[in-house]
Structure formats: structure tokens, C-alpha cells
Image: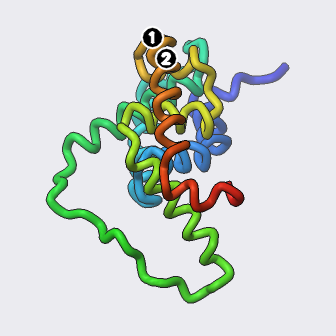
């Protein structure tokens, strides 16, 4: 007879399986790596408190991504925006990684030029691989709104000069 592992073990397994993807999604939504880890930790804490509700959700991943997006939005509301990070980073000592850093920077700058709604749509669709229906649920909008956000975002990315310089790499 198999024993029910219980909600704590189930939550632990869920977090272990998805932590890296959730952190990466937060980075793609505009967080630094350290901020992304904090945002994901806060989102997962919120999910743990309501784990019985998360367990009953039709789509746990969509539910958790919605909590993640809402947590990021909440954290940005409280953030003081008087300081900005520098636009140019110092050169890296390892020349092998230079191309990767340049491409990553180009993608980051292109994503930063999108509206937060468009950026969320691109990340949820092409990084998290959510369906339009799941995205509509996560973003709390109609499926048609998801489609228009994606369409506008992709059009903007197609015209972005930073990405045009790296078409062969992307």
C-alpha cells in the first residue's frame, strides 16, 4: 500500500522540478539573477501557504506562473526607481564567452523595450511554453488579448536593431 507523501513532500518535489525554469522565467521578465531568485522564492512561499488550492488547480504550472507574474508586478510597485544600472558592462576577461554575452545583452535590451504586458506574453509563450489559454488565465485577460500582445511583441522584436545584428546566432 503506497502512502500519500503529503502536501509538504509534494510541494518540495514540485519546487525541485521547477525552480530553475521559474528563476529563468523571472530573469526573462526583467529581473537580475538575484532578484529573480527572491521573486521566485516569494511566489513559491505564497503558493505553499495556499498549496491546497494550488493542488486543486486545473493547471498547477499556469497557477504558479500567475503567482510569479503577480509577485514580480507587486515587487516593482514598491521599488524605488531613482537609480538605474549602468548601460555598459565592463569587458569580460574570458574572450570565449564574449559572443554569448553580447547576444544575451542584445536579447535583454530588445525584451526591455517591450511593454511589460508584451514581455510577459513572450516569456510565457516561448520560454514557459504555455498555451494561449494558459496565458490568458495567468495574465487574467481574454485569449484574443494574448494573441494581440504576442503579435505586437513579435512585430517589435522583428524590427529591433539589436536582434537584427544577431539573426544568424538566434
In the picture shown, does residue 126 fall above or below 135? Answer: below
Q: What numbered label is drawn on residue 44?
A: none
Instruction: Give percent across and percent down for residue 137.
Output: 49, 16
Front in this rendered view, residue 112 or 135: 112
Q: Residue at x 46, y 51 (%)?
A: 110
Q: How far apart, in angstroms, are the residues tagged by discs 2 and 1? A: 6 Å
Mark 2 and mark 1 in contact? Answer it, CB < 8 Å. Answer: yes
Q: Residues within 10 Å of mark 2 (few under 14, many from 20)?
A: many
In the picture shown, does residue 78 fall above or below 46? Answer: below
Question: Which residue appears farthest toward the bottom when viewing the image?
Answer: 93
**Image quadrant for the N terminus?**
top right
Q: Number of marks in the image?
A: 2
Instruction: Give percent across and percent down for residue 125.
Output: 59, 31
Q: Residue at x 41, y 17 (%)?
A: 140
Q: Is residue 133 left or right of residue 79?
A: right
Res. 67 image quadrant: top left
Q: What numbered label is drawn on residue 136?
A: 2
Instruction: Please tell me whether mark 1 sits on a helix, a strand or a loop.
Output: loop
Instruction: Give percent across and percent down for residue 50.
Output: 43, 23
Front in this rendered view, residue 20 or 121: 121
Q: Earlier in the sequence, mark 2 or mark 1?
A: 2
Front in this rendered view, residue 66 or 118: 118
In the picture shown, does residue 131 fall above or below 160? Answer: above
Q: Which residue is mark 1?
A: 142
Instruction: Give percent across and percent down for residue 53.
Output: 48, 16
**Image quadrant for the C terminus?**
bottom right
Instruction: Please tell me whether mark 2 sits on a helix, a strand or a loop.
Output: helix
Q: Residues within 10 Å of mark 1 (few under 14, many from 20)?
A: few
What colour-coding does the image apply? rainbow
Q: Residue at x 67, y 42 (%)?
A: 17
Question: Which residue appears farthest toward the right when viewing the image?
Answer: 1
Q: Residue at x 60, y 49 (%)?
A: 20
Amino acid at each position: 500500500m503506497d502512502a500519500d507523501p503529503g502536501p509538504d513532500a509534494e510541494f518540495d518535489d514540485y519546487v525541485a522540478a521547477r525552480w530553475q525554469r521559474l528563476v529563468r522565467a523571472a530573469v526573462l521578465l526583467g529581473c537580475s539573477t538575484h532578484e529573480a531568485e527572491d521573486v521566485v522564492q516569494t511566489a513559491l512561499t505564497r503558493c505553499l501557504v495556499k498549496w491546497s488550492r494550488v493542488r486543486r488547480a486545473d493547471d498547477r504550472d499556469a497557477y504558479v506562473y500567475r503567482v510569479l507574474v503577480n509577485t514580480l508586478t507587486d515587487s516593482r510597485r514598491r521599488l524605488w526607481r531613482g537609480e538605474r544600472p549602468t548601460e555598459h558592462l565592463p569587458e569580460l576577461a574570458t574572450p570565449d564567452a564574449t559572443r554569448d554575452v553580447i547576444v544575451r545583452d542584445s536579447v535583454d535590451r530588445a525584451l526591455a523595450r517591450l511593454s511589460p504586458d508584451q514581455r510577459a506574453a513572450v516569456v510565457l509563450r516561448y520560454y514557459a511554453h504555455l498555451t494561449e489559454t494558459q496565458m490568458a488565465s495567468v495574465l487574467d485577460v481574454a485569449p484574443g488579448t494574448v494573441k494581440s500582445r504576442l503579435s505586437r511583441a513579435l512585430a517589435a522584436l522583428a524590427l529591433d536593431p539589436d536582434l537584427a545584428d544577431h539573426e544568424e546566432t538566434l
